[in-house]
Image (spheres, rainbow, N blue to C red):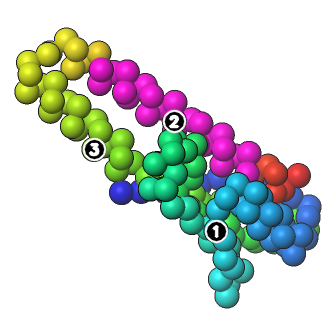
């Protein structure tokens, strides 16, 4: 299960320069990128590989960049994905385990802490996506 998130930014750079910067920024961060016939750049990530070395918490699960020109400015739209299946499985397994062993107060404390951690990760991934977009459009 993936969440689809979106951000955009205006820039005065020409589209070929932006496309080059997108590829460089994604390559520097270890993503695999390709361009489609409609000039949309799509990138992917192997989240399971990153999960094995605990890097998944600070990696986007893929996304796409699209460019549009308006009034001598280029608008860079960045749609990125966040996988939440891992968090849901861990959340459910922990809740079931703690409820099964009748740890009611501990269930509430652990679930609250885990939800806070998921929220922090969501904010961190949003900052990472905005940082990628900033690196491309400055």
Q: Nearer the viewer, residue 19 or 97?
A: 97
Distance Cα–Cα, label 2 vs label 1? 22 Å
SS type, badge 1: strand
Q: How far across and how far down the image is residue 99, in percent?
A: 11, 25
Q: How far across and how far down the image is residue 60, in percent?
A: 57, 52
Q: Residue at x 14, y 16 (%)?
A: 103
Asked whether, in this view, residue 25 is left or right of residue 128, the answer is right
Q: Residue at x 66, y 71 (%)?
A: 33
Distance Cα–Cα, label 2 vs label 3? 16 Å
Q: Which residues are magenta?
A: 110-132
Where does label 1 land, which residue? 32
Question: Mark 2 or 1 closer to N-term?
Answer: 1
Q: Nearer the viewer, residue 101 or 62?
A: 101
Q: Nearer the viewer, residue 25 or 64?
A: 25
Is residue 62 shown to the viewer in this render? Answer: yes
Asked whether, in this view, residue 54 is left or right of residue 29, the answer is left
- Crowd class of label 2 (few under 14; some 14 to 19; many from 20; radius 10 Å): some
Question: Mark 3 or 1 closer to N-term?
Answer: 1
Asked whether, in this view, residue 44 is left or right of residue 107, the answer is right
Q: Check residue 128 for magenta coloring.
A: yes
Picture quarter containing residue 71?
bottom right
Where does label 3 land, which residue? 89
Picture quarter containing residue 76?
bottom right
Where does label 2 land, which residue? 121
| Quarter in which the N terminus is drawn | bottom left
Indicate which label's residue lies in the foreground, 2 or 1. 1
Tag 2 and tag 3, C-beta contact below 8 Å:
no
SS type, badge 2: helix
SS type, badge 3: helix
**In the image as oriented, which residue stretches furthest toward the bottom?**
37
């Amino acid at each position: 299960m993936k969440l689809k998130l979106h951000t955009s930014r205006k820039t005065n750079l020409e589209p070929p320069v932006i496309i080059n910067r997108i590829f460089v920024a994604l390559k520097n961060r270890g993503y695999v990128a390709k361009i489609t016939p409609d000039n949309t750049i799509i990138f992917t990530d192997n989240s399971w590989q990153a999960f094995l070395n605990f890097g998944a918490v600070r990696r986007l699960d893929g996304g796409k960049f699209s460019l549009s020109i308006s009034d001598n400015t280029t608008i860079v739209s960045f749609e990125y994905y966040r996988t939440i299946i891992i968090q849901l499985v861990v959340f459910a397994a922990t809740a079931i385990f703690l409820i099964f062993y009748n740890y009611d107060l501990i269930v509430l404390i652990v679930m609250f802490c885990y939800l806070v951690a998921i929220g922090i990760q969501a904010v961190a991934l949003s900052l990472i996506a905005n940082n990628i977009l900033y690196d491309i459009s400055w």
